[in-house]
Image (cartoon, rainbow, N blue to C red):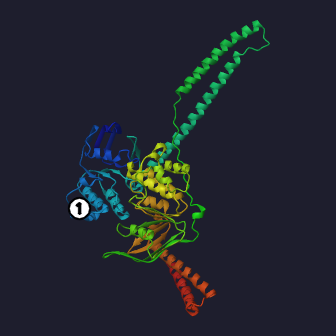
């Protein structure tokens, strides 16, 4: 069943054509993800579909009732019923003083309980924690109508969508399948473009070579051998003129053929950026940061109680947990040098905060990044180009940039500066999917230590090899990827095994210390107490290993 139909849509900002969409149909079974780089007009298209923006050419016909879940607060007012509020953990009444996550939950509850047969949603996962995103996924999965969603959450798009619409230079192209399928199709298109370009270059070179060869033959016909008599020379010239005419005809035919072969532009190449921590900045201690007996509270709200954590050298750590559990607080405690958190003396931290305050508004992109860079300008330009700042773009002042562009400038400034630990607080905010995947690849290749906070599950899974999760005011660790962490979490047996392994590791480390002290005791050491502890540790290790065996 057809729910919405768009014909000949043209949208201008001044003289600039933003959207040029010939035809778009949305059917009742469609679950659409709308993607494209920032500034392409995704939100503009959503506003046209929702009837918020009426200043465009063309027609939009709706054959059913739809709900809008938008980004703007002015679209929202009033209250929702208690059932809707409970389903999303939202307030019953709208209040402009609500937090970002609370506002998003209210909008979602309102949108889902309007009894519509289509949902139009612009960044519905914005400000939600992972738990909130998973609740939203379940709601969309059970929703019986169609939907079109703008989102940069690839896992979200993968789990829900059966069609991806790619908005590029004002035009749309539809791809069947989820986001992963869309990326595969795009890669195939790119590989085909590369192949066709290479074939074009070969054919062009072959024809140009043949033309040059024919021209050389023509030049040799013009020359009369010196030893010929007059009559022979005359005959040679007559024969030569005929041959020359044939060669000229051949040349013209080949030149026409050259003109008519389809000109193929060279597909854009992406240079891989490998960022290594300079040798003099490398950390040689195994432990970079160690927190013990961490306690933090705001008024009557306890954030951390006797919490502890460890960041190891060259590890890539993701700090996760529900909104308000203390993720950003912990990052600030590390930065500010909390007494209970010990840091390596050689540590040089690059801190990315959500305020984007490390760049100077009046300086250009290039000036901002080169100001503290340990790399030469050529490498800085290559890195900026990889982040989609090309040619004259690098001379733009920061004050004219969009939120997503500012994020990329901050990111470039940090990774190219004199640091050996990256701390990133929600680095994926404001990024379109293309930019997000570029940042992801750079971080995967980064040779230093990383501690990041993010609600993007695929981003975390691609980068992190250690998960730190905040639960019950404590910080727990899970070695491995996010997928492995979820597997352990959902499987009690694996979870118990991991807990025992952690206890064994702690005891083995302590056993090494005790053996060291017993081997060369100092005057302060109580040898009898150490000897007693030694045998107790051995017994505890034996008990734990037996427990592990019996799981």
**Residue closer to the observer: 185 or 255:** 255
**Residue closer to the observer: 459 or 336:** 336
- Where does the image place residue 345, in percent across and percent down from the top left? 53, 71
- Where does the image place residue 15, in percent across and percent down from the top left? 34, 36
Q: Mark 1: which secondary structure?
A: loop
**Residue closer to the observer: 402 or 467:** 402
- Residue at figure coordinates x 53%, y 44% from the top left: 269
Q: Is residue 101 above or below residue 122?
A: below
Left or right: 214 as drawn, with respect to 2? right
Quarter placement of the N terminus:
top left
Residue 180 visible in the displayed image: no
- Where does the image place residue 6, in percent across and percent down from the top left? 30, 40
**Residue closer to the observer: 346 or 141:** 346
Q: Is residue 515 above or below residue 475?
A: below
Picture mark count: 1
Residue 323 figure quarter: bottom left
Left or right: 231 as drawn, with respect to 475? right
Residue 149 visible in the displayed image: yes
Name the outermost residue toward the top: 231
- Where does the image place residue 67, in percent across and percent down from the top left? 26, 51
- Residue at figure coordinates x 52%, y 26% from the top left: 260
Label 1 environment density (alpha carbons within 10 Å; few <14, some 14–19, many ≥20): some
Name the outermost residue toward the right: 227
Label 1 belongs to which residue?
Answer: 95
Q: Is residue 329 above or below residue 268?
A: below
Q: Is residue 531 above or below residue 393?
A: below
Name the outermost residue toward the bottom: 528
């Amino acid at each position: 069943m057809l729910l919405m139909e768009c014909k000949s849509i043209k949208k201008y900002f001044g003289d600039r054509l933003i959207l040029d969409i010939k035809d778009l149909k949305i059917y009742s079974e469609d679950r659409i993800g709308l993607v494209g780089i920032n500034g392409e007009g995704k939100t503009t298209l959503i506003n046209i579909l929702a009837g918020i923006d009426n200043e465009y050419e063309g027609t939009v016909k709706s054959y059913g009732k739809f709900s809008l879940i938008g980004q703007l607060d002015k679209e929202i007012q009033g209250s929702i019923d208690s059932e809707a509020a409970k389903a999303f953990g939202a307030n019953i009444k709208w209040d402009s003083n609500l937090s970002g996550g609370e506002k998003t939950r209210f909008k979602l509850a309102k949108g889902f309980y309007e009894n519509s047969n289509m949902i139009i949603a612009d960044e519905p996962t914005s400000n939600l924690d992972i738990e909130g995103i998973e609740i939203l996924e379940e709601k969309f999965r059970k929703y019986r109508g169609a939907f079109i969603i703008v989102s940069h959450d690839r896992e979200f798009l993968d789990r829900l969508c059966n069609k991806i619409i790619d908005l590029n230079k004002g035009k749309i192209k539809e791809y069947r399948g989820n986001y992963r399928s869309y990326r595969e199709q795009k890669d195939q298109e790119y590989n085909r473009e590369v192949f066709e370009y290479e074939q074009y270059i070969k054919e062009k070179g072959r024809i140009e070579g043949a033309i040059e060869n024919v021209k050389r033959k023509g030049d040799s016909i013009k020359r009369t051998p010196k030893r010929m008599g007059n009559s022979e020379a005359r005959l040679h010239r007559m024969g030569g003129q005929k041959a020359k005419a044939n060669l000229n005809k051949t040349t013209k035919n080949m030149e026409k053929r050259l003109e008519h072969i389809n000109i193929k532009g060279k597909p854009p190449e992406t240079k891989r950026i490998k960022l290594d921590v300079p040798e003099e900045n490398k950390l040689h201690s195994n432990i970079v940061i160690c927190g013990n007996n961490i306690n933090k509270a705001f008024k009557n709200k306890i954030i951390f109680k006797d919490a502890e954590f460890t960041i190891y050298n060259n590890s890539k750590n993701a700090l996760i947990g529900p909104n308000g559990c203390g993720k950003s607080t912990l990052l600030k405690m590390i930065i500010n040098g909390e007494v209970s958190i010990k840091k390596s003396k050689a540590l040089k931290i690059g801190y990315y905060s959500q305020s984007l305050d490390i760049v100077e508004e009046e300086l250009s992109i290039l000036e901002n990044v080169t100001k503290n860079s340990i790399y030469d300008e050529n490498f800085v330009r290559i890195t900026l180009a990889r982040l989609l700042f090309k040619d004259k773009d690098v001379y733009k002042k920061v004050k004219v940039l969009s939120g997503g562009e500012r994020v990329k400038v901050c990111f470039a400034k940090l990774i190219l500066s004199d640091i050996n630990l990256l701390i990133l607080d929600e680095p994926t905010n404001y990024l379109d999917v293309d930019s997000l995947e570029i940042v992801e690849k750079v971080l995967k290749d980064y040779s230093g230590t990383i501690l990041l906070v993010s609600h993007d599950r695929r981003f975390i899974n691609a980068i992190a090899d250690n998960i730190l999760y905040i639960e019950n005011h404590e910080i727990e660790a899970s070695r491995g990827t996010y997928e492995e962490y979820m597997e352990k979490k959902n499987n009690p047996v694996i979870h118990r095994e991991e807990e025992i392994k952690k206890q064994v590791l702690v005891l083995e480390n302590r056993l090494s210390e005790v053996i060291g002290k017993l081997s060369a005791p100092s005057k302060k050491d109580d040898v009898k107490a150490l000897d007693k502890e030694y045998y107790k540790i051995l017994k505890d290790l034996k008990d734990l290993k037996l427990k592990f065996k019996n799981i």
